[in-house]
Image (tube, grey):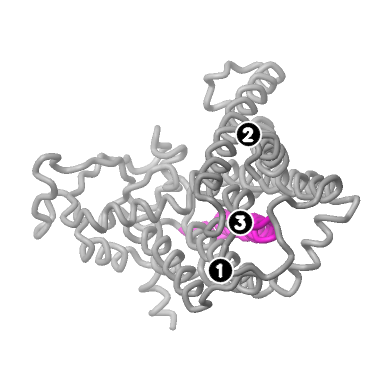
């Protein structure tokens, strides 16, 4: 067993998977040439545990072996774009579009459950990385296609955790509310999570054990949380202490995030997630206090609402909503950063100052709390005003 775990934790299986998918370091025998029109692509990569030597995404390396420019060759562009797209399903661009889309166009209760599970799973995953401190795969032999997350530790893969949590919580939350083939929903959840997991190997960001561990941890947390779903949901909607609890607890967790010897984006990412969940949770509570759900039906429905509604209304709700959310994020970032810059006496362009805990935590938390609140309260009110319900 120890030998198997050692093999799964090593970089060689990741490198073999990349080669089998047509991704080679430039100059490696058998690599050949990729697209002749483009030539070799380039990424900056770090030897060994990138988290120890390349804070802030390899902008400037701290003392240790120097980073180098890694050239790589793509021989199979189908896998390249498939896994690059799959990797994006675990990034902010997916969370800030899919979760609100579910709230605006499918079901409030489904969205609530996904957001709560997502925030709990991601917090545990992010903290586990900085407690375990397992390095990411070595490069070489692995080709690394991402640099920002290379400043983090590897175990567990939070992409794998988030994909497993979101896809299967969506399936579990909808299977008893909407009539659709359960086999189809199960296969869709499995394919979604599998693609994201494999993308972490293809991009060279995780070992096989990181990915398996992330998926298993997420599955265990889902099993533990499922019996309490209804109770948690009821408390979030009805408890008078919900707004205070939703803000104070995540904020305390962010300020007491495990300390590292170097800067890593994990604390900022964790604060972003908990901030968005806090703002959304306050929005859920406020909506329940002052208005009935505009999108949710209590009866079992044949198919999803977005399939039975006019496509134009679905697209209009999404486009209006996402524009308001992005505008809110931009305004909140600008205002909060300006206030913090005035308070702590640093110029707005000082990236090093933004990484300080007293700046990063309120900056991220307030910004994304506003995003979560806007998505759950302001946007639905705007939809009603525009006649898009």
Rendered image: mark on residue 90: none
| Mark 1 crowdedness (10 Å alpha carbons): few <14, some 14-19, many ≥20 | many
| Mark 2 crowdedness (10 Å alpha carbons): few <14, some 14-19, many ≥20 | many
Q: Main secondary structure of the magenta part?
A: helix
| Mark 3 crowdedness (10 Å alpha carbons): few <14, some 14-19, many ≥20 | many
Q: Residue 187: x, y in percent? A: 45, 74
Magenta range: 106-134
Which residue position holds label 2? Answer: 360
Which residue position holds label 3? Answer: 106
| 116 left or right, relative to 201 | right
Q: Is residue 332 magenta?
A: no
Rendered image: mark on residue 168: 1
Q: Nearer the viewer, mark 1 or mark 2?
A: 1
| 146 left or right, relative to 218 | left
Q: Residue at x 68, y 16 (%)?
A: 342
Query: Dividing the picture into quarters, in which one does residue 2 lie?
Result: bottom left
Q: Residue 280: x, y in percent? A: 70, 46
């Amino acid at each position: 067993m120890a030998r198997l775990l050692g093999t799964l934790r090593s970089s060689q299986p990741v490198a073999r998977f990349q080669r089998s998918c047509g991704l080679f370091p430039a100059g490696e025998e058998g690599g050949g040439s990729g697209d002749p029109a483009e030539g070799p692509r380039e990424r900056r990569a770090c030897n060994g545990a990138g988290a120890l030597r390349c804070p802030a995404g390899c902008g400037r390396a701290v003392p240790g072996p120097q980073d180098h420019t890694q050239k790589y060759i793509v021989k199979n562009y189908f896998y390249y774009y498939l896994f690059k797209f799959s990797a994006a399903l675990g990034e902010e661009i997916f969370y800030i579009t899919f979760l609100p889309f579910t709230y605006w166009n499918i079901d409030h209760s489904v969205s609530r459950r996904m957001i709560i599970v997502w925030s709990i799973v991601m917090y545990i995953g992010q903290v586990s990385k900085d407690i375990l401190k397992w390095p990411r795969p070595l490069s070489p032999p692995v080709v690394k296609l991402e640099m920002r997350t290379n400043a983090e530790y590897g175990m567990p893969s939070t992409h794998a955790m988030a994909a497993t949590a979101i896809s299967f919580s969506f399936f579990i939350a909808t299977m008893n509310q909407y009539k659709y083939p359960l086999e189809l929903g199960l296969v869709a959840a499995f394919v979604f999570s599998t693609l994201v997991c494999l993308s972490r190997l293809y991009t060279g960001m995780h070992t096989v054990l990181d990915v398996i561990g992330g998926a298993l941890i997420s599955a265990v947390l889902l099993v533990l949380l499922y019996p309490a779903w209804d109770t948690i949901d009821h408390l979030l909607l009805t408890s008078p202490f919900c707004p205070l609890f939703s803000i104070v607890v995540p904020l305390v967790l962010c300020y007491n995030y495990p300390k590292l010897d170097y800067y890593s984006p994990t604390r900022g990412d964790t604060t972003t997630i908990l901030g968005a969940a806090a703002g959304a949770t306050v929005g859920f509570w406020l909506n329940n206090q002052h208005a009935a759900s505009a999108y949710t039906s209590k009866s079992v429905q044949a198919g999803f609402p977005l399939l039975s509604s006019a496509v134009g209304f679905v697209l209009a709700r999404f486009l209006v909503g996402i524009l308001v959310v992005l505008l809110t994020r931009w305004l909140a970032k600008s205002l909060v950063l300006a206030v913090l810059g005035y308070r702590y006496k640093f110029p707005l362009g000082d990236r090093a100052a933004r990484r300080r805990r007293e700046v990063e935590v309120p900056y991220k938390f307030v910004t994304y709390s506003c995003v979560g609140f806007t998505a759950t309260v302001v946007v639905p009110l705007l939809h009603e005003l525009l006649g898009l319900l």
